[in-house]
Image: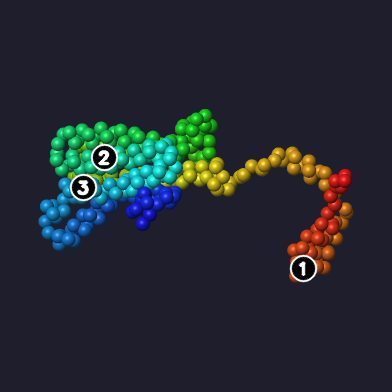
């Protein structure tokens, strides 16, 4: 419900994370449409009745996940009044929606103008989204990082995995190029096969994205003390050690005497009784008053 009515609720991490996952399942949404059409027409003449490639319903359904993310970005801007990064992120999803409808216009009308617009916008949004993946979602390109092009805090032990992810994310983002003219690549000659292959590649890209996105969230939570890893003490350890050195050492046999008296109190003794006993066996320096 929070996803379907995005924009009406405050946005939490779980909300936009799930919506991002749905953005990679556009092919699934269109297949659900095809399945519904298939059963509605009793499997009769599917090429004419259920040609989802030439239906305006298809882009409308495929654009739902990026539309939900767009609404979430606008809601976060409304709540925080911070144009960066929320409006910049909203622009990215607006571009994704535009690509979806431009691709549909190209398929349905077969006009060159729509094909050119689709390619131009796709190239721009591919670069924009890749930068967003690496810089915003994964936290890379940290200035003066001890790991070139990455960030100081890395959870995974091999830096090569991060560099591989950077390159593969760009390649998988640009996989839509197979759509321009599949026959030129000498691999696919059926647009349905191309659509399926691109859907699989997008799932692989999102699978990889999840690891580094969650890692970056964890690092940021720890760095901002939203989650506990190591919190620095509010005083120097040397000062603490000096205070300890001022405490008079316990008398010989303190441990055994204290243990014997605790045993005498028995397990039913109250916490106050144990505290009084501990105080009686602990010597503190006089305050000089």
* Circle 1 residues within 10 Å: few <14, some 14–19, many ≥20: few
Horizontally, residue 226 falls left or right of residue 120, namely right
Q: CA distance from mark 2 to mark 3?
A: 18 Å
Q: Residue at x 18, y 61 (%)?
A: 39
Which percent across, then down, holds residue 8? 37, 51
Horizontally, residue 29 falls left or right of residue 141, namely left
* Circle 2 residues within 10 Å: few <14, some 14–19, many ≥20: many
Quarter holding residue 274:
bottom right
SS class, disc 2:
helix
Residue behind mark 1: 269
In the image, which is nearer the foreground, mark 1 or mark 3? 1
Sequence-first disc among 2 and 3: 2
Which dot marks residue 99? 2
Front in this rendered view, residue 274 or 213 = 274
Sequence-first disc among 1 and 3: 3
Q: Residue at x 19, y 36 (%)?
A: 114
Q: Residue at x 52, y 29 (%)?
A: 144
Which dot marks residue 192? 3
**CB contact under 8 Å: marks 2 and 1:** no
């Amino acid at each position: 419900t929070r996803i379907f009515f995005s924009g009406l609720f405050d946005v939490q991490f779980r909300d936009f994370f799930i919506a991002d996952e749905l953005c990679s399942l556009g092919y699934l949404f269109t297949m659900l449409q095809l399945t519904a059409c298939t059963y509605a027409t009793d499997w009769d003449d599917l090429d004419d009745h259920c040609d989802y490639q030439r239906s305006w319903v298809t882009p409308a359904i495929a654009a739902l996940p990026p539309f939900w993310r767009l609404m979430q970005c606008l809601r976060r801007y409304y709540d925080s009044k911070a144009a960066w990064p929320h409006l910049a992120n909203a622009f990215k999803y607006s571009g994704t929606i535009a690509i979806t409808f431009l691709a549909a216009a190209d398929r349905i009308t077969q006009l060159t103008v729509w094909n050119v617009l689709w390619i131009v916008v796709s190239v721009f949004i591919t670069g924009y989204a890749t930068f967003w993946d690496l810089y915003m979602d994964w936290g890379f390109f940290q200035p003066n990082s001890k790991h070139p092009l990455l960030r100081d805090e890395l959870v995974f032990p091999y830096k090569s995995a991060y560099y591989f992810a950077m390159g593969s994310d760009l390649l998988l983002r640009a996989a839509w190029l197979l759509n321009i003219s599949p026959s030129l690549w000498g691999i696919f000659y059926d647009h349905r096969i191309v659509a399926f292959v691109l859907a699989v590649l997008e799932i692989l890209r999102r699978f990889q994205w999840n690891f580094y996105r969650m890692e970056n969230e964890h690092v940021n939570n720890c760095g901002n003390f939203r989650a506990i890893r190591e919190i620095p003490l509010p005083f120097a350890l040397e000062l603490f050690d000096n205070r300890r050195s001022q405490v008079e050492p316990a008398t010989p046999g303190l441990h055994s005497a204290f243990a014997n008296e605790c045993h005498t109190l028995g397990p039913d003794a109250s916490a106050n009784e144990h505290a009084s006993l501990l105080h009686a066996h602990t010597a503190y320096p006089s305050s000089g008053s």
